[in-house]
Image: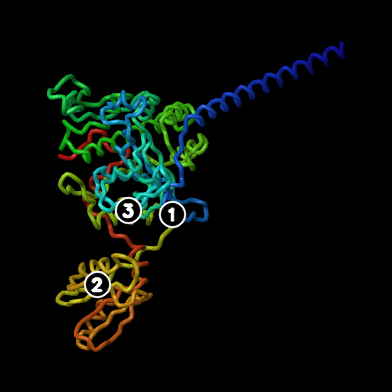
Amino acid sequence: MGVRGVKRKRSRKRWIIAIAVSLVVLVVGAAGAVYLKLNANISTFDSAGLSKNRPAQARADANGDKPVNVLLIGSDTRSGENGKLGGSAAGPIGRSDTTILLHVYPDHKHAVGISIPRDSMVDIPPCLLPSGRWSPDQPKAMFNSAFSVGDTEKGNPACTQNTIEKLTGLRVDHTMVVDFAGFAAMTSAVNGVDVCVPNTLYQGDMNPNLGHQGKVVLKAGMQNLSGQKALDYVRVRHGIGDNSDVGRMMRQQAFLSALISKIKGQGMNPTTLLPLADAATKSLTVDPGLGSPAKLMSFGMSLKNIDLKNIQFVTAPWKYAGARIDLVHPDVDDLFAELRADRTLDGVNASGKVQPKPTPAPTVDGTGVSVDVYNGTLTDGLGGKAADRIKADHFTVPQVTTARSQDHATTRIEYGASHAADARSLAQLFPGAQLVPLNITGINLVVGQDFAKSAAGTPKALPKTVTQQARSAATNPCSKLSYG
């Protein structure tokens, strides 16, 4: 009896172990199958096409935290399934219909997305062609033409990344390209996105060449949109506001805000993220650094602690230049300087580090004092920056030019005997500058490398034209949907 009881107990134990092992095998097998499925979906582009002259990588702090810059590109290629969703008349060659640079701050509690107008005139650096050759520099070229360099269906994401890095001075860590089919599938995977349609839209708004109003495509008011209708919403230009591409970008920002809100509301967990990843990866092209489900999932999960109100979207400062768009300087330069300094649009230090309070700038009145400015460094534009600084204190700047030698480590203020007091006042704006009396009649400011470091470390406060048009992911969905 005792022996049989022992056998039964051992038998039951083995049976429980067998079930447990089977469940583990099933779970691991299922996870492996999902991983392989997602892995098979992902396409990567060749990193050989990235520029050899890139901005430096951001350094991690003591905790290993550093900013992450992700370039999001919406391709309007009509190849394959995309032609059914966007119309095939435009041909299969890929162009960038939408481009957003997402800057995730080192504290991983703030993020900002910068929309770049596709018709912006920018400098496109050399890019790798399918033949293996590199294209020449393209000064003052239309921004979205960078993605078309090489004329391929998949486009040239490396060229767009090179262009963004040259424009912003920020190193892009990851690039993601999604086409029409991928976007439509993603919106369906989350069971639609709740967005606000400003006014009823018709077939004639979607296709101005139709010649008549046509049927209703989207009704005014809050709508849950997915698939084709979601694509219609983010692509339509006519019939809303000023009918512009820049106005459309505001609705794209609103849509992304609503999508982020939906995903965070459902919970950033495998139940939510796996269907989304499956849909996205079928039409997703990424850099090799994101070329696996594990890397994509890890990046997605790294954003889970960012509150909706701390995810902001803004359009790079712009103005019309005929049929095209010029980026507004120095506003756009100041915007990217804020990102490089890891300050948010409203000036919050999001570097994750405690920074000392800045020393208040001295009050100087340069009214009636003329100063010739000379760039004594090899840094382009540094003389102009110095001139802007002293003009703000009412100094007059008759000329800005290059110094005889461009190896000045320290800024010099050269002055004639009758301008000693004015030179000392000017020196208050350039701590550490050398005061040099000479047999001259006025004042010369020879800008040194010390000013280059100072100017880089203290970006200007952003103008209200930038900050007031920004929206957070928590903004009312029916506000800021267009210009005009």
Q: CA distance from mark 3 to mark 1?
A: 14 Å
Name the N-terminal-most of marks 3 and 2.
Answer: 3
Q: Nearer the viewer, mark 3 or mark 1?
A: 3
Q: Residue at x 24, y 84 (%)?
A: 415
User: Can you tell which mark lies on residue 52?
Assistant: 1
Percent across and percent down for residue 126 are: 36, 51
* Amino acid at dot 2: Thr
| Above/below status of 101 relative to 270 | below
Q: Nearer the viewer, mark 2 or mark 1?
A: 1
* Amino acid at dot 1: Lys
Q: Which residue is mark 3?
A: 137
Of the 4 image quadrants, the one containing the C terminus is top left
Question: Which element carries disc 3, helix, strand or loop?
Answer: loop
Q: Residue at x 29, y 56 (%)?
A: 333
Q: Nearer the viewer, residue 50 or 238?
A: 50
Percent across and percent down for residue 294 are: 52, 36
Query: Badge 3: few (under 14), some or many (20 or more) residues near its Cα, within 10 Å?
Result: few
Name the N-terminal-most of marks 2 and 1.
Answer: 1
Q: Is residue 346 visible?
A: no
Q: Residue at x 24, y 89 (%)?
A: 439
Residue 275 as seen in the image, left or right of residue 333: right
Percent across and percent down for residue 469 are: 23, 45
* Amino acid at dot 3: Asp
Residue 228 as seen in the image, left or right of residue 172: left
Total labels: the figure holds 3
Percent across and percent down for residue 433 are: 33, 77
